[in-house]
Amino acid sequence: MAEGGGGARRRAPALLEAARARYESLHISDDVFGESGPDSGGNPFYSTSAASHSSSAASSDDERERPGPPPPPPGAPDAQEAEEDEAGAGWSATLRDRPPPRFEDTGGPTRKMPPSASAMDFFQLFVPDNVLKNMVVQTNMYAKKFQERFGSDGAWAEVTLTEMKAFLGYMISTSISHCESVLSIWSGGFYSNRSLALVMSQARFEKILKYFHVVAFRSSQTTHGLYKVQPFLDSLQNGFDSAFRPSQTQVLHEPLIDEDPVFIATCTERELRKRKKRKFSLWVRQCSSTGFIIQIYVHLKEGGGPDGLDALKNKPQLHSMVARSLCRNAAGKNYIIFTGPSITSLTLFEELEKQEIYCCGLLSPRKSDCTGLPPSMLSNPATPPARGQHRIKMKGNMSLICWYNKGPFRFLTNAYSPVQQGVIIKRKTGEIPCPLAVEAFAAHLSYICKYDDKYSKYFISHKPNKTWQQVFWFAISIAINNAYILYKMSDAYHVKRSGHPPGAGAGAAPRLHVPAGALSVALAQQGAASS
């Protein structure tokens, strides 16, 4: 037993090196946060730890527990007739190699920031002073109109730009302390911050919070439910587009924006009952090489109609509508988009392929729109195949893959050749062969999941009741995340960490063991200092 354990320990470094090589071949940035556990070796998804198979096991258990299709009734077409039907629909077990989508663009920041650039400089690539000045104007307009209608407020004075920056700094500071109420800064308790509390009085902060607006009034032509925040979202999108060029591989998904787990664990049942359920859902298109969020899409739950959030979670065709909205600026660029089961469908992938957008998605017979797919690939065989085996059928450039690990996993793709092989690396089981599309999907999606687990802990904790304000603070959190990524990719990061620009002979810069919250701290301090 001891010898076997020693052999496993000796084998682990070799597996880790193999994982690194596969990881680098997929062009995913090396540990964007600079954090590596003792076993990860800078590789956030080819985990060689025992916990690495937990998500895989959970997914395969879901597939394994799902009952197989019922036996065909008497008189139903036999297997040969079913094969002929599928062949008539264009699906064939004869595979052919195809080149990957050609991509010659170089992803990354579009402008070089100076080594002296501060956290505020990166943040203001997305939220410049002219946007903040508009917030000042709109807030003062709303305060004036409010007082004309409901009576004068003698304690109110028009807000200034420096006060608005300080106001944002206070809000952003909650992403570090994870306190439910920003007013805790002045409380004198555990979450108090004396240096920030001295900048602005609590009474003044509450007045600005009361009247704060991005758009004070609805125009006669506006019908959108997010009219109070949509101009800011549009400005933010323009900033994302002009500041960063994404890599070829991207992911469509919902980022983690649920309640802070610390609050949920400590609040009372009464406080939980008072919490209002979110009235919107937020999707993003995210660069899977860096974690940069390229595009945001917000869907409002505006009632019980067919476009409501409840319907959206249960109807794959509405998820396809979200995917089309997120990909509207991606046409003609040969991007490869990874999708989850609720978005994956043959109709959507064929539609996007005509726009030179290629896809690779996990398919679920229960959650996905399986229209046009061969039934033989959606049913489970009576005898489970061995781990690593797979079946593939092809229609044009589209491949439907059924790969077996601890259960069947199905993938639909037109981005990867069905004849090219990949490998999934685990410590306990070693290398598991798989089609290249399976390896790419596992790599990029696992990276995004681990990335989101980190940066979602640094979302602004302030939870207003108004939907437009919730969307606004989530958007600010995403802007901070993107600004931090640009900072990590700039010379300013190396100067900050080592005191020398890269290549100046000072050796490797030490790793920063703090995720995107480091930028939140800097922004809060900058906002406080400016006032």
Image (cartoon, rainbow, N blue to C red):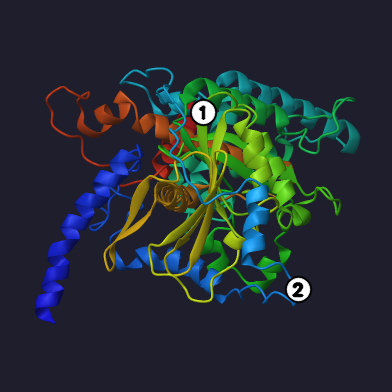
Task: Give the percent coordinates (x, y) of residue 63.
Answer: 55, 69
Figure quadrant of residue 365: bottom right
Residue 334, numbered label: 1
Q: Is residue 455 left or right of residue 38?
A: right
In the displayed structure, would residue 192 be above or below residue 528?
below
Which residue of the protein is positioned furthest toward the bottom in this rendering? 1
**Observer-nearest residue: 531 or 478?**
478
**Where is the N terminus found, in terms of image quarters?**
bottom left
Q: Secondary structure at mark 2?
A: loop
Task: Give the percent coordinates (x, y) of residue 275.
Answer: 70, 61
**Observer-nearest residue: 41 or 327?**
327
Callout 1, which amino acid? Answer: Asn
Figure quadrant of residue 209: top right
Residue at image position (57%, 39%) is 396
Instruction: Estimate how packed mark 2 is, as few (under 14), some (14 to 19) or many (20 or more) residues with alpha carbons within 10 Å.
Output: few
Number of labelled discs? Answer: 2
Task: Give the percent coordinates (x, y) of residue 51.
Answer: 35, 67
Q: Earlier in the sequence, mark 2 or mark 1?
A: 2
**Observer-nearest residue: 477 or 247?**
247
Residue 75, numbered label: 2
